[in-house]
Image (tube, rainbow, N blue to C red):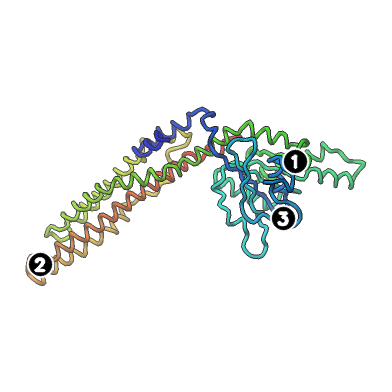
């Protein structure tokens, strides 16, 4: 991490990410992985969590289940076998038709991976969840619960035509079609029963999680890198204060010269030049973005679209305050007929303050652009096939 932070600080974004992307999978074994179990109320989320933990209802540490049991906030459960894995039982989505929905309070971005739990047919609630998760650039498995109840119901309704394999295949195809309609290219669907964990796809789901655990942890770690670099960007911004003070003071001195409006165009030029220097110093210039785009398999245009650079017009608007000092100078020259002492002081002071503000704003904007570029650069990591 120290090498990563040092590279970010020196504007070497490609080197920083390359160092992390090339690390072997075992390097991420100790990375925490937060898996959110989401779905509609009554879908069997809490029972599914207990099944994953190997617990029965009522056991110490088990999630509360049963009629009337409702999850009102996200609750963590440490997995007993998978290292550094925490399952989160989320409130049911759309579970409160009146009043505030507990699910709406949950920050989904804090979770690394999702298991969407559903029962009966694929519904709008599932589609909404899928859209939210995909919007975060995260991956998920879709788990269709209560398979045992579906089979029992089918057997009672049509005992002569009962075929377990065909029924299970029909359930999986319904889920698959629903997910593909929502733009999921490679749906991962598992049919389970939380009461019969040795049947259906429950063993396969556990094996799949175990098999891809290190990949999931790697994706979680890399997806979190933009947030890890935030303190580094703040430190870099703080280190530029002396340069900003010096430039603002220099522009204030130019504005204090007894020539009305003299400082406007030099200040505009120097501010934009400082903006360009910041982009290069933070590693957002065109050659650096091209190298970063090649590393992460994206286009430089896509990375550049994440930036919000200051425009000459916006900087010029802030420099219009220089006209106040120029106006005072003109009044002293032509109305009071003496050397513009007050005008020079006013012009220099205003130019210093506006220059300092613009340069600080420029630095903050470029630091924000760096963070957004890193988010865009690693976003694809969360969408790779699992």
Mark 1 nearby-residue class (10 Å; few <14, some 14–19, many ≥20)? many
Mark 2 nearby-residue class (10 Å; few <14, some 14–19, many ≥20)? some
Q: Nearer the viewer, residue 87 or 241?
A: 87
CA distance separating discs 3 and 2: 82 Å
Q: Which residue is mark 2?
A: 333
N-terminal label among 3 and 2: 3
Where 164 falls versus 37 (above or below)? above
Task: Single out the residue that lies furthest toward the right.
Answer: 160
Which image quadrant for residue 177?
top right
Q: Position of residue 195 (x, y in %)?
A: 78, 42
Q: Position of residue 207 (x, y in %)?
A: 68, 32
Q: Nearer the viewer, residue 201 or 125?
A: 201
Please state which of the two labelled residues, at mark 1 or mark 3, is closer to the viewer.
3
Q: Is residue 294 visible?
A: no
Element carrying mark 1: loop
Element carrying mark 3: loop
Q: Which residue is mark 1?
A: 192
N-terminal label among 2 and 1: 1
Query: Which image quadrant: the C terminus?
Result: top right
Q: In the image, 229: left or right of 215?
A: left
Task: Single out the residue that lies furthest toward the left.
Answer: 338
Mark 3 nearby-residue class (10 Å; few <14, some 14–19, many ≥20)? few
Q: Position of residue 84 (x, y in %)?
A: 58, 38
């Amino acid at each position: 991490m120290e090498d990563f932070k040092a590279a970010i600080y020196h504007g070497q974004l490609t080197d920083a990410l390359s160092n992390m992307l090339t690390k072997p999978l075992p390097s991420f074994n100790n990375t925490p992985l937060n898996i959110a179990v989401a779905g509609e109320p009554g879908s069997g989320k809490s029972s599914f969590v207990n099944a994953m933990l190997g617990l029965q209802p009522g056991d110490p540490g088990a999630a509360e289940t049963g009629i009337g049991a409702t999850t009102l906030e996200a609750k963590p459960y440490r997995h007993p076998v998978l290292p550094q894995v925490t399952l989160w039982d989320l409130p049911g989505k759309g579970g409160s038709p009146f009043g505030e929905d507990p699910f709406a309070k949950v920050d989904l971005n804090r979770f690394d991976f999702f298991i969407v739990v559903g029962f009966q047919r694929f519904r709008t609630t599932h589609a909404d969840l899928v859209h939210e998760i995909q919007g975060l650039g995260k991956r998920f498995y879709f788990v269709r619960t209560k398979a045992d109840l579906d089979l029992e119901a089918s057997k009672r309704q049509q005992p002569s035509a009962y075929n377990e394999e065909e029924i299970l295949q029909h359930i999986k195809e319904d889920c698959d079609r629903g997910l593909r309609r929502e733009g999921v290219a490679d749906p991962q669907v598992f049919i389970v029963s939380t009461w019969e964990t040795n049947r259906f796809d429950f063993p396969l789901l556990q094996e799949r999680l175990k098999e891809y655990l290190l990949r999931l942890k790697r994706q979680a770690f890399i997806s979190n890198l933009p947030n890890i670099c935030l303190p580094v960007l703040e430190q870099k911004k703080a280190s530029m204060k002396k340069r900003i003070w010096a430039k603002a003071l220099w522009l204030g001195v130019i504005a204090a010269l007894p020539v009305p409006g003299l400082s406007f165009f030099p200040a505009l030029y120097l501010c934009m030049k400082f903006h360009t220097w910041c982009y290069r110093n933070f590693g957002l210039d065109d050659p650096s973005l091209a190298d970063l785009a090649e590393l992460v398999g994206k286009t430089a245009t896509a990375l550049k679209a994440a930036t919000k650079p200051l425009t000459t017009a916006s900087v010029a608007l802030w420099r219009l305050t220089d006209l106040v000092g120029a106006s005072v100078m003109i009044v002293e020259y032509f109305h009071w007929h003496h050397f513009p002492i007050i005008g020079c002081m006013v012009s220099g002071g205003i130019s210093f303050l506006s220059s300092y503000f613009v340069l600080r704003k420029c630095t903050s904007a470029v630091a924000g652009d760096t963070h957004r570029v890193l988010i865009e650069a690693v976003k694809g990591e969360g969408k790779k096939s699992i």
